[in-house]
Amino acid sequence: MARDRRDKYYWKAKDDGFRSRAAYKLFQINEKHNIIKKGDTVVDLGAAPGGWLEVARHISGGRIVGVDLKRISFLEGVETIAGDITADRTIEKILNLVGRGGSDVVICDAAPNLSGNWSLDHARSIDLTRCALGCAKKILRPGGHFVVKVFQGDMFTEVLNEVRDNFAFTRSYSPHASRSQSAETYIIGKKFLTSPVRRGDEFDVQINEIGSSGDGVVLIDDFVVFVKDVELGDNVRIKVQDVKPNFAFSEVIRKESSID
């Protein structure tokens, strides 16, 4: 507590009437990456005590839902759910509030209970991040945005790539309001992908169309995938390199003559 009381964001939160200094992290994340917009529906996972809920309500003014195992004290204009974000019944409760179309934004500033053992704490943080991502994939609308806290460490790149596989734009960002000695950072995922392909997927295809740019064009479950360095009629195995909301880019990894 003594450390907190020497922290300018602790005093700023007191002066501005926010429940937590963490409020300024979300303000700074949003200023940098434009995650929450006016009127957005926002779901906050692991929301207690409510610092991010206050900010989401302030920025959006739309429907705001907080989810936590702990009780969240009343906030005007905010709906709360007591539940485990990995449980199907909690997902159902969230969708009943935000609608079957899904939420515009899912945010998560939750952290595991710290043991003092860094390897264990990092592993717990990664597990919590994956739980938040799993929940977000079930409740986000196509094109929606995601923010989640994670501790940096050996498994950080792995979980960053897991987020990257599900969003058109992915970055890590450390707001100034995070304490300088903290290993926390935030993964930002924008434009949730609901396409039938993902980065790294491989397919055997025939090139029946060449686009105006000279790339091959194939459809995978009616989803457009561009293929570099091919000619009309080629039979190739492709690997997806990048996925956007409406199309993907791929490269040839084998020609027909080398396919077993």
Image (tube, rainbow, N blue to C red):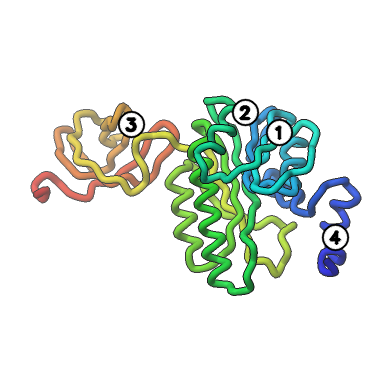
Amino acid type at mark 2: Leu
Residue 98 location, quadrant: top right
SS at badge 4: helix
**What x and y, as percent, mark residue 181?**
70, 70
At x 36% / y 43%, what residue is drawn? 198
Nearest to viewer (mark 2 / mark 3): 2
Amino acid type at mark 1: Glu
Per the model, the C-alpha gap separating discs 3 and 4 is 50 Å
Q: Is tag 2's residue or tag 3's residue first in the polypeptide sequence?
A: 2
Mark 1–mark 2 contact, CB under 8 Å? yes
Amino acid type at mark 3: Val
Residue 54 location, quadrant: top right
Nearest to viewer (mark 3 / mark 1): 1
Q: Please name the residue that numbered disc 1 is placed on.
A: 79
Q: Nearer the viewer, residue 198 or 238?
A: 198
**What x and y, as percent, mark residue 234?**
15, 38
At x 46% / y 48%, what residue is drawn? 164
Q: Please name the residue that numbered disc 3 is placed on.
A: 224
Mark 2–mark 3 contact, CB under 8 Å? no
Amino acid type at mark 4: Lys
Q: Is tag 1's residue or tag 2's residue first in the polypeptide sequence?
A: 1
Q: Which mark is residue 8?
A: 4
SS at badge 3: strand
SS at badge 1: strand
